[in-house]
Amino acid sequence: LAMEQLVREGHINPSRVEAVVADCEKKIFSLIADEGRKVVRELDIEDLHPELVKLIGKLKYRTSYGQSVLGHSKEVAFLAGAMAVELGMDEKLTRRCALLHDIGKVAVPDAVLTKPGALTDEEYEAMKRHPMAGDRILSAIPGLRDIADIARSHHEKWDGTGYPMGVAGDSIPLEGRIVCIADAYDALTTKRSYKSAMEVELALQILEKDAGTHFDPQLVALFVAGKRSGRGYKGVSLQA
């Protein structure tokens, strides 16, 4: 519509419309790729497929409940990476898994993803499809099968009542259980369109209450101890 108006007003020659649109698209795709590369550098993640870097950049322009999907994913990556260090795991790999956990939200309709209020049952079902969408996106790229498993499993619950597969306990990949806790903590402590940001201590108490049902109880104990002691878990930029 904006392009039609520019043509009507004589700002763009009608014969140049296709060229102008192509140039705009090229600039937009370049901007998105630059954003993806910036995040990958910030998180010290290496050897990501170029198309995946573009998808990461695209998340900056996607919002969910009023929060940038990319901003949320970065925070979850920092938190999950800190937990990986405590567990003696590969910090960079865990960060990579966490950064990509919500990549499936690129497939969620804008009307659902950006809705400011509560979702209807039908809309919530559409939102719940993002773990499987992430699995499909990531598993299509050679070498990312394990990371696809994390994207698929980050909404599973310890007691088996989560989604999309309803698996329980140790059947949920360890990185998926870590990301689940980091994801929930950031959701609780961040302002969203339907709620205010929660105080840290109250968020930790909720995690403790749901340990053994929603969350892996041993991982919750580790995370909560880390937050209360100030031992990392701050979610600040690695370059800060």
Image (tube, grey):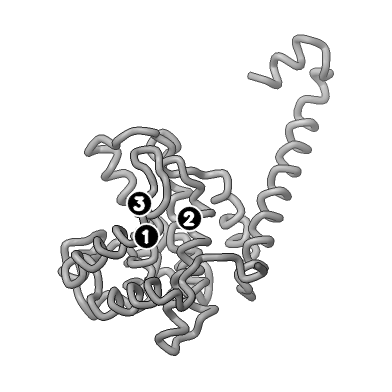
What x and y, as percent, mark residue 118? 29, 36
Residue 200's disc is: 1
Mark 3 neighbour class, 10 Å CA radius: few under 14, some 14 to 19, many 20 or more: some
Q: Is residue 120 left or right of residue 174?
A: left
Residue 198's disc is: 3
Say which of marks 1 and 2 sits in front: 1
Label 3 with label 2: CB-CB less than 8 Å = no
- Spatial separation of the CA atoms under disc 1 and disc 2: 16 Å
Residue at (69%, 47%) from the top-left corner?
A: 29
Work out whether 231 lies above or below 43: below
- The amino acid type, in three-letter code, at marker 1 is Val
Sequence-wise, the earlier of marks 1 and 2 is 2
Residue closer to the observer: 13 or 240: 240
Label 3 with label 1: CB-CB less than 8 Å = yes
Residue 50's disc is: none
Residue closer to the observer: 17 or 182: 182
**Residue located beneath label 2 in the image:** 72
What x and y, as percent, mark residue 239? 67, 69
- The amino acid type, in three-letter code, at marker 3 is Met
- The amino acid type, in three-letter code, at marker 2 is His
In what element is the residue under mark 2? helix
